[in-house]
């Protein structure tokens, strides 16, 4: 009888200790202040951003003690806004980061959202544009980025064609389908959105993939960026942010349909069918042949920096080690 009583007391004490520890841990978590952060998109919400919305809706940011606000761009270059600290994190591209760092703007890429460059010069079949040489005498519809003119100049020069014979028309973020063949003959698009939509609409496009023009142009776009101060002064916060984002994209890769539904609920103005089809296509692209989502290779950064410098598109060589980091990926 006494042995049973002692055993009972031991069991009760163990239960009380477990309960106490759980209560203590719960109090510790609840007493940790939530840090508000802002994430600046590079365009309107689309499937490049799905992992961010998943992280918000599934509670991954909250789990890391973060309250994330995802905002769309209004005025100003994303890189400059992030560098100034007016937003904590942003969506940009390797080309924008490279141009910014060449001007001593202190931003750093934290992760590649997509492993390979899925952008292309697109035109309607009837234009007959099938290679870079065909750009001569055509109308280019651009969004007004300095990298566009620089890239077109370099590509035209590589095939001994005259860039000045391209009529450069800035159309901004205007819908591709309302301007192609109307205001412009060719545009630079991301296949995962406009290319998928063209196929959905039954529109045949000629596509000239950037990555096929030169292996160096298979760079990272889009990427997630922050400024150097975050890495120096708020490294742990940045690490927690990246853990939440990483889990958001991993969920998206594993559950594309459910992730698409989260994006649709977060941005109900988007076409549902386009989101589902775009998400299905991009799911294979996020991680592709990399060991894990988000990883960036030094050779990719190094090659593109040299490509720009050799063509005098940037005034000085920059150190790729300062332009990106894999350190904060889980």
Image (cartoon, helix red, strand yellow):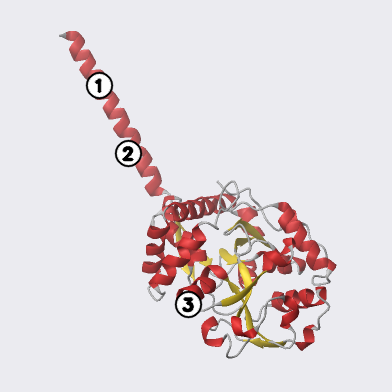
The numbered mark at residue 202 is: 3
Q: Quadrant of residue 308?
A: bottom right
- Numbered marks: total: 3
Name the N-terminal-most of marks 1 and 2: 1
Q: In front of the other: label 3 or label 1?
A: 3
Badge 1 crowding class, 10 Å Cα cut-off, few under 14, some 14 to 19, many 20 or more, is: few
Q: In front of the other: label 2 or label 3?
A: 3
Q: Position of residue 294 (x, y in %)?
A: 58, 53
Badge 2 crowding class, 10 Å Cα cut-off, few under 14, some 14 to 19, many 20 or more, is: few
Work out whether 185 lies above or below 29.
below
Residues under labels 1 and 2: Cα distance? 18 Å
Name the N-terminal-most of marks 2 and 3: 2
Q: Secondary structure at mark 3?
A: loop
The numbered mark at residue 279 is: none
Q: Position of residue 101 (x, y in %)?
A: 73, 65
- Which residue is drawn at the image coordinates 84% and 67% (left, top)? 310
Badge 3 crowding class, 10 Å Cα cut-off, few under 14, some 14 to 19, many 20 or more, is: few
Work out whether 74 lies above or below 105.
below
Question: Which residue corresponds to mark 2?
Answer: 23
- Which residue is drawn at the image coordinates 32% and 39% (left, top)? 23
Work out whether 161 lies above or below 116.
below
Name the N-terminal-most of marks 3 and 1: 1
Q: Left or right of 256: which side holds 102?
A: right
- Which residue is drawn at the image coordinates 76% and 79% (left, top)? 133
Residues under labels 3 and 1: Cα distance? 69 Å
Q: Left or right of 281: which side holds 290?
A: right
Is residue 175 in view from this perspective? Answer: no
Is residue 298 in view from this perspective? Answer: yes
Residues under labels 2 and 3: Cα distance? 59 Å
């Amino acid at each position: 009888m006494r042995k049973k009583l002692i055993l009972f007391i031991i069991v009760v004490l163990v239960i009380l200790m477990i309960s106490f520890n759980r209560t203590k841990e719960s109090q510790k978590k609840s007493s940790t202040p939530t840090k508000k952060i802002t994430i600046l998109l590079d365009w309107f919400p689309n499937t490049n951003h799905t992992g961010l919305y998943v992280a918000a809706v599934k509670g991954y940011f909250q789990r890391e003690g973060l309250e994330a606000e995802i905002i769309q761009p209004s005025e100003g270059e994303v890189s400059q806004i992030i560098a100034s600290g007016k937003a904590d994190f942003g969506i940009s591209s390797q080309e924008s980061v490279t141009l910014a760092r060449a001007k001593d703007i202190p931003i750093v890429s934290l992760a590649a959202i997509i492993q390979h460059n899925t952008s292309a010069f697109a035109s309607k079949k009837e234009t007959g544009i099938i290679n870079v040489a065909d750009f001569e005498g055509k109308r280019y519809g651009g969004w007004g980025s300095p990298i566009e003119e620089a890239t077109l100049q370099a590509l035209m020069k590589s095939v001994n064609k005259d860039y000045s014979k391209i009529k450069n028309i800035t159309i901004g973020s205007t819908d591709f389908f309302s301007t192609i063949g109307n205001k412009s003959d060719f545009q630079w698009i991301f296949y995962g959105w406009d290319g998928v939509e063209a196929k959905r609409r039954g529109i045949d496009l000629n596509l000239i993939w950037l990555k096929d023009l030169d292996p160096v142009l298979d760079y990272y776009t889009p990427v997630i960026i922050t400024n150097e101060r975050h890495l120096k002064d708020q490294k742990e916060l940045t690490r927690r942010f990246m853990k939440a984002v990483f889990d958001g994209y991993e969920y998206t890769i594993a559950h594309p349909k459910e992730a698409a539904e989260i994006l649709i609920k977060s941005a109900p103005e988007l076409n549902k069918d386009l989101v589902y089809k775009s998400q299905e296509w991009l799911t294979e692209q996020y991680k592709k042949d990399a060991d894990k989502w988000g990883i960036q290779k030094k050779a990719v950064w190094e090659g593109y920096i040299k490509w720009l410098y050799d063509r005098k598109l940037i005034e000085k060589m920059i150190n790729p080690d300062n332009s990106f980091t894999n350190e904060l990926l889980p």
